[in-house]
Image (tube, rainbow, N blue to C red):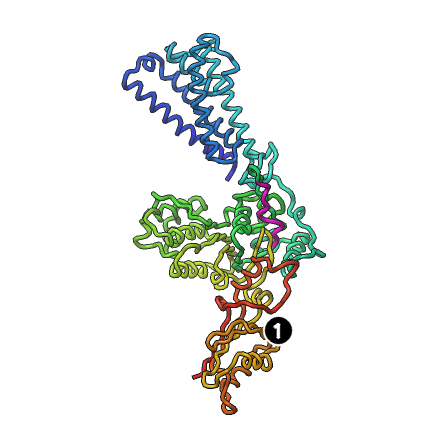
Amino acid sequence: MSARVYWASNYVFGQLFLGLNSFGYYGMCWVFGVPNFTNAGFGLFFVLFILWSHAEIGMSFFLSGVLNSPGTASVSCYLIMMVMSVGGSVLTEQFDRDFPDSLLLFPPFAFVRSLRLILEGGGSTIRIDSPLFEALMYLFLMGTVLLFVGVYLHAVVPNESVGQQQSFLLCLGEVGNGKGPRVEDAARNPRGKSGVDEDVLAEEIRVYDSVIANTSDPNVAVKVINLRHTYPSRGKAQPKVAVEDLSFMLNYGECFGLLGPNGAGKTTALQVLSGALTPTGGNALIGGFDVLKDMKSIHSILGICTQFDIVWANLTVKEHLLCYAKIKGVPKADRNSEAQKIATKVKLDGDAYSFMASQLSGGMRRRLSIAIALMGNPSVIFLDEPTTGLDPGTRRDIWDIIEREKTAGRCIVITTHSMEEADALCTKIGIMTNGTLKVIGSSQHLKSRHGEGFKMVVVANEGVGVETDVMKNWVRGNVSEKAKLISNFNGNYTFMLPVDVNISGCFDVLEREKKRIGEGGSLVKEWSVSQSSLEEVFVRIAQGDVGGGIEERGGGGGGNGGGIEMVLSHE
């Protein structure tokens, strides 16, 4: 959105809201025949109310630019208005004729002074040399000064939403469409970089070489180049680096899962890429458009499903979709059919199509948010934790929707805490901790390279009466000498096998032993082997088990959620 449009729309809304309140109050006084109001012409009140609304809007812009917190700005504005309005009435009584010009620099004092002069003097005209004209001029000029200073402060002062300052000449330009550094300036050669996983380093080199080559690859949907975002200090808290030197590149047709614990920087990264936050450093290209210069173009090809549903309680599903169809530039003749088509995709057609958002369940509201993201057929879609807090059935429905939307001409980026979700949907996965990308690759690659190894469960044959040492020695002698016994419960032995174990040989040994007859019988009744799950990889990395690259090692722990499990049972 253009900054001019943003500020102009806020100004118009403020004039309408404040003006209606002021004229409503005047109308009540006129209806009930309050003498002071009926003796003065309507034109005087009209000018006063318009200028007072103008000054109030200027004060609100200024205070919200000075104070980071919207709540603090609102309370401060109310207190200032109350104190100055009451104080202005008292001072007007004291300085009946010679009101100090210095006090007129404060809009509430100027308003109270102007209102008193109109109520006491009556009439319907304003003389240029009159005290009323002077007070009204102060009201207009100070309101204008505060308004422009407020807009400027929003543009150049870092706050909790914007971490990068802009120049004065850019503060009324396009949001994310001003002059910025070249993409090449954000690139740094990562070769020789230490303390980084080799897959992450290879990805950074791929991004760097692509930027330096300065070639436009039509297959690249998202290119992130050393992206950084720092939240400014608040109170005694130090500045927080939420995203640090993030680099990766995605092609159309890919579904990328960005994983990480709470506070890892996933949502902040998506907010920077979608224009909600300004990068503190680095750059990114979405569909070939620069996030620092071409955000308006990016918004035309981008669909976003935020972490929390942004819907209006009193609008129906149909009204939501028609609204966003207009925003996304869908031709008027096609909006109804497009809205109906999207609603059908997310299973919000039928009766639900006419339901207000307040009547929808949590899962239905989530599907509405995804429908909004799909409106306009975007080529890049960001889904920020699309299934968090949903029941398994609804979660599966949303997975089906996402799976159907994975097309060759579209790139989807998902943040999630569900390893099962990432395993099921994503063709490429990156795991972040503390704002940095730790590992990247396909799900199978991450499990193979960063997993603990393989978990083998052996159920002993009850008729043989296998002792623990016997089973342990047999496994180490026949399957792998590096096998580690993790647990033994009621004849169920769990071993961790190293990553380099010969799986096919392991299968042959276990199956032959299970079928062996004679010599006291088989030791093995049932067996299973499962690969390390994505969840185990995630936990290992999130707990800081990755430092200066990944070292392959065997070890304890195991589970098979999300892993590949093969079970052969004795029949």
User: Residue at coordinates 33% horizontally, 24% vertically from top-left?
Assistant: 24
Percent from the top left, x then y, of residue 247? 61, 53
Q: Is residue 203 magenta?
A: no
Instruction: Give the quadrant of residue 49.
Output: top left
The residue range painted magenta reads 237-247
From where the camera sits, is residue 565 visible? yes
Q: Quadrant of the C terminus?
A: bottom left
Q: Main secondary structure of the magenta part?
A: strand
Closer-to-camera residue (4/352): 352
Query: Mark 1 is on which residue type?
Result: Asp
Compared with residue 291, is residue 71 higher up or lower down, i.e. above or below?
Answer: above
In the displayed image of the protein, which residue is found farthest to the bottom? 518
| Location of residue 79 with respect to 303 vertically, above or below | above
Residue 308 coordinates in the image, percent (x, y): 44, 48
Please give left or right for residue 69 compared with residue 194 in the image.
Answer: left
Q: Circle 1 is placed at which residue position? A: 500
| Residue at 72% from the left image edge and 56% from the top image edge | 192
